[in-house]
Image (cartoon, rainbow, N blue to C red):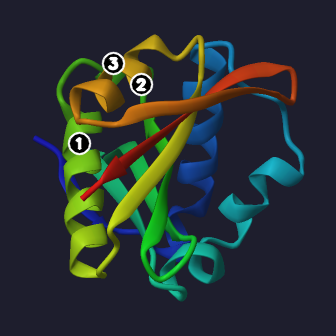
Amino acid sequence: MLKIRRYRASDHNEVWNLHNLALDQVGANAGSGAQDNDLHTIEETYLSDKGEFLAGFCEEKLVAIGALQRISDEKAEIKRMRVHPDFQRRGFGQTILNRLEMRADDLGYKILCLDTTVQQIAARKLYEKNGYCEIERQRLSGFDVIFFEKRL
């Protein structure tokens, strides 16, 4: 069973490790750089600006994360969706996504967007299954990236 709570500063190292482990597993890790600055400023980037950052635990171990970042009064972005490779295919990604969408609705957002790399097939299937529609593709940091959007 997944126990979900809001991110705490004491989670930082576990979040960082899970982020890298999950991206390494699918070959989508661009390495440390400016693209990861938000993971070192979670409180400011997500929690203090009409957003959210969730941490999911199973057997006292951090196994899933996901975030919601404000873009405008009506639009937010789903970010940092990660599930530990040993805990995939248990519905944890779906659970985190559901909670983020509920939080987005509570905060008054009308549109959610997100992106994922082409090779993250499980993530793509999750988003498509949940009503996210592809709106464009770009090449970023050496990866083919798909952008999705959903109206709440």
Amino acid type, label 3: Lys
Percent position (x, y) of residue 105?
23, 71
Q: Are dots 3 and 2 in contact, CB under 8 Å?
A: yes
Q: Secondary structure at mark 2?
A: helix
Q: Secondary structure at mark 3?
A: helix
In the displayed structure, would residue 147 be above or below residue 40? above
Pointer 1: what residue?
58
Circle 2 crowding by C-alpha within 10 Å: few under 14, some 14–19, many from 20: some
Q: Secondary structure at mark 1?
A: strand
Percent position (x, y) of residue 4?
23, 58
- Along the horizontal axis of the image, is 32 left or right of 38? right
Mark with earlier residue (3, 1): 1
In the displayed structure, would residue 139 be above or below residue 48? above
Amino acid type, label 2: Ala
In the displayed structure, would residue 146 be above or below residue 149? above
* Residue at 30%, 59% in the rendered image: 100
Amino acid type, label 1: Cys
Distance CA(mark 1)–CA(mark 2): 20 Å
Circle 3 crowding by C-alpha within 10 Å: few under 14, some 14–19, many from 20: few
